Amino acid sequence: MINTTIVTGIWDLGRSNLSDGWSRNFDHYINNFKKLLSSLGDDVPVIVFIDKEHEDIVWSIRNRSNTAVYHQPKDGFSGNFFPFFDKVQKIRTNNQWLEQTGWLKDSTQAKMELYNPMVMSKMFMLHNAKIYNPFNTEYMFWLDGGITNTVHEGYFSHDKVIHKLEKIVDKFFFICFPYETNSEIHGFRIDGMNRYSKAKVNRVARGGLFGGHIDYISEANGLYYSLLNDSLTEGLMGTEESIFTIMTYLDEDTYKYHMIENNGLINKFFEDIKNISSEDINSIHNKSRKPYENNDVLLYINTFNSPEQLQMVLDSFELYDNNFLNKTKKILINNSTKVNLKDQYDKICNKYNFIEHICKGNLGICGARQFAAEDFDNKKSKYMIFFEDDMLLDLSKNICNVGFSKYVNNLYDNIIKIMNKEHYDFLKFSFAEFFGHNGDQWSWHNLPSEQKIKYFGPVKKKPHTNIKHIKTFNNVPYAEGEIYYSNWPHIIDQEGNQKLFLDTKWDNPFEQTWMSHIYTLTKQGIVKPAILLASPITHNRVHFYEGNERREN
């Protein structure tokens, strides 16, 4: 199955009782719902929220291997599931709200007590689906159960547009169409829209399709809940689309959107997605970054002549944060010169499901790092994490000698989220290192004399690191600025990999050379590095080798 779950549902809210132009029989929704369920295909996991009495519709088409049903009675929209029911009823029966514009008094919002409670609950159901996540996918999108009323089912069955969503959405996503008015949007006064949006609103977000990466669904749900509560309390109401629209103005970095034509028909979005070329699909939202072809995170570990030392690293992953083992594709670069150790290494690789065990002789520490860079480039994956076998995640939960915590909650997930958010060229994990810490600018030792003078003046000892910004994400602090490169554990994307290791290559690379070169690129504004304000890594080599066996390259 693909890595995206579609969340949907239908309810009989009594729309057949409305006047001409607004009326629709529930059979109309059932027929379109069946088209949707049939067209999504067996490889698309689906979550359905529905009244128990209509559950059989789902099982007449789908099966339990790719579909989950959660009973959501329509009465719940007037009960505890939707806590704003009373506020909605007060507004929709208020003459001042009804008389804003001629069409509003006959609309579904005004005539049906459950219409707004239901459509305004779609975000909440998406969030519930994220919590349940029975198919363990990383992306979830709400898709209206009656979507095939306006969107041909061939986009799903033939063109496979759902398969492309996870490749073009990195955070949270809406579809918008251009719209300018001096009065209201779906009944939400435009002066209120502008005030909440902190901008002059000239677009509207659609409610038929929205969603994104599960890491951002709770954040979106929280903002949506707050905006809905505040605006309804103030007597301002449109539909869920009014709140979605405001969200796209408040944080355009998180809430990305795709513009369609001013008629607002969503089929234009699916036509656009259908026609996206494979060359362009991964650079839609961030064209300045080097594109990648898959969402894999590759974990490279460099090891030498000690399976026991490698096991220590893996044990630290397992105890500290096993997502380093479970969510990555692991590659072992084995520099060992003792051939008799290969079987022991093979056993470890098999136990932990390494995808590759690479033995090319002793490439050296930096030679292995360069190999990892070139292999990562060839595999076209999204991120690479690099470890040496004496770099362990520290389980002590103490503080380092600089005063930073050695424990970071959900370390793996948070470094991924920070990279997704900030698009750094590389992010180091540990402020404290074996010979010092990142508060001092160690690049100073390795720069040519003329560059030392240019960047630091006539100082006689290494200066402090120039930190430009300190930020936090999920209570994890991190800093960006003139962070020096070292071989200590870090995460890097394709763009950063290209700048650091591929644009310029050395026949015999040294860590000091990279440190000097990358610092120069940072000063020139070419490289943007960052570091966690934490020290989860401890250098701990227990199984030693002869000093004369050490090679840099």
Image (cartoon, grey):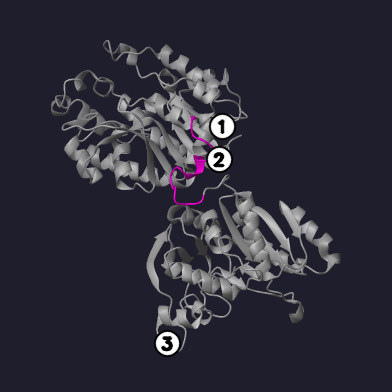
Direction from residue 399 to residue 264 in the image, left or right: left
Which of the labelled discs sits on residue 137, or is there none?
2
Q: Residues within 10 Å of mark 2 (few under 14, many from 20)?
A: some
Q: Nearer the viewer, residue 80 or 64?
A: 64
Q: Position of residue 183 (x, y in %)?
A: 16, 31
Question: What amino acid is found at the position of numbered circle 3 in the picture?
Answer: Val
Badge nearest the viewer, 3 or 1 = 3
Residue at the spot 51% in from the left edge and 80% down from the top edge = 448
Badge nearest the viewer, 2 or 3 = 3
Disc 2, SS: loop
Q: Position of residue 356 (x, y in %)?
A: 73, 53
Residue at the spot 52% in from the left edge and 61% down from the top edge = 499
Q: Earlier in the sequence, mark 3 or mark 1?
A: 1
Residue 491 within the segment the image draws in magenta: no
Q: Position of residue 9 (x, y in %)?
A: 45, 26
Which of the labelled discs sits on residue 459, or is there none?
3
Residue at the spot 48% in from the left edge and 40% down from the top edge = 168
Q: Earlier in the sequence, mark 2 or mark 3?
A: 2
Outermost residue to the bottom: 460
Q: Earlier in the sequence, mark 1 or mark 2?
A: 1
Q: Nearer the viewer, residue 77 or 406?
A: 406
Do the residues bearing badges 1 and 2 touch, measured as CB atoms within 8 Å? yes
Q: Quadrant of the C terminus?
A: bottom right
Q: Position of residue 254 (x, y in %)?
A: 39, 47
Please name the residue that numbered disc 1 is placed on.
45
Question: What amino acid is found at the position of numbered circle 1 in the picture?
Answer: Pro
Q: Nearer the viewer, residue 13 or 37?
A: 37
